[in-house]
Amino acid sequence: MANSQSAITPPTTPDEPKTPSTPIAPTNPNKPTNPSVQPETPSIPTIPVAPMIPIQPSNPTLPQTALLSNKANAQVSLRQAQLLLVENELLGIHQRLGEVKNGEKGNVWVRNVNSREKLTALSTDDSQTSGFKQNIHSLQVGADTTVNDNFRLGGFVARSQADVDFNGNYGEGKVRSNTVGLYATYLANNGIYVDNIAKYSRLKAESDHTEKRHYNAYTLSSELGKQFKLSGDWIITPQAQLGWTHIQGKENEDSLSSIYSRVGLRVAKSFTLTNGWNLQPYAEINAITSRNNNSKIHYANAALNVEDSRGRFESVLGVNAGVTNHRLGLEVSRADGKRYDKPYQIQAVYRYQW
């Protein structure tokens, strides 16, 4: 134990604490100097530009239907022109009924018809024709005689031509027709009548782009109507016509058949003048339609359909005048349809009766 106690060192007395020194006073900061360059005054902001009103986009242009070649267009259009020419000849023949219902024993007549027709551009296969205009000139000569009091039989010959203008740069064409026909008319005492026509036409068609071709055409037509004779020499005649035409085909062309129908009303008024002349002015309205079979023109890569003229409305004004054995007639008409228009048709007729 004695050794362990001697080994302990007694604590020392601590030093007296010193007085801290006085702190140094901080220096005052330097006074800032004014800047040598004054800041620029900001400019007045410009008025913002009003945004542009967006332009309404235009409708996109549809791709044009491919047009036919000159030759194909001419072939399709000439087939349509042939049918219109053959149908046009029927109008003059049936029209004679307004002049021949007075019980004469015999008649010889001559008729001149001039008209202008337009057929619009029509689709065919994946293409479209140019459409065309044609001027038609026709001369018809006929004669008939009574078989009995109610039945009349007659015949006629006709020569017609159509000068065809294919629209645009497609050139021109021609159709010629020589026709011979027979007609028979039954007129009952009560005013009902039936008028039948059978005719054959030899057609010739050519154009700037096609060779000359000849065709045989056959037509049958029948008109049914009734005359209502009213007081004051007024006559009202409702009428209906149905016709069939068949035109021969050639080489790459199918034969062409058509059904022609017409429903109309005719109103006439008769006058007797003091100098012996008889006048009969008249007006007529008709609804007409023409429909073809599925006739085509064939090429190596296409079969082009010959479209029909469809429906139209026809209006007619005319006058018949007669003295002794002579009768004259003058008629103007027009027709309007979606596909077909006839701006004018003028008919003049002379008839000698006995």
Image (cartoon, rainbow, N blue to C red):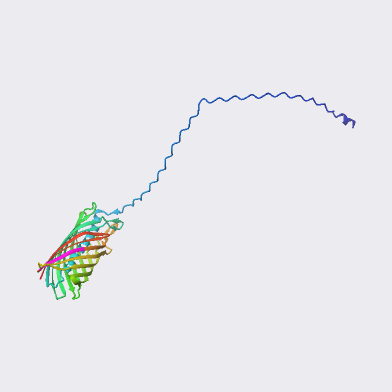
* Left or right position of 6 against 275: right
Q: In the image as oriented, which residue stretches furthest toward the right?
A: 2
Q: Vertical placement of 301 versus 12: above or below?
A: below
Choose top left, top right, bottom left or bottom right for residue 20.
Answer: top right
Q: Which residues make up the magenta segment?
A: 316-323
Residue 199 shows in the view: no
Whether the magenta-drawn stretch holds residue 320 is answered as yes
Residue 174 in the image: x percent, y percent? 19, 57
Choose top left, top right, bottom left or bottom right for residue 314.
Answer: bottom left
Residue in view at x 16 percent, y 64 percent: 319
* Left or right position of 325 against 288: left
Residue 55 in the image: x percent, y percent? 38, 46
Counting every numbered tag in the picture gives 0
Choose top left, top right, bottom left or bottom right for residue 155.
Answer: bottom left
Query: In terms of depth relative to the viewer, which is nearer, 89 or 56?
Result: 56
Query: In terms of depth relative to the viewer, which is nearer, 215 or 90?
Result: 90
Quadrant of the drawing holding the C terminus? bottom left
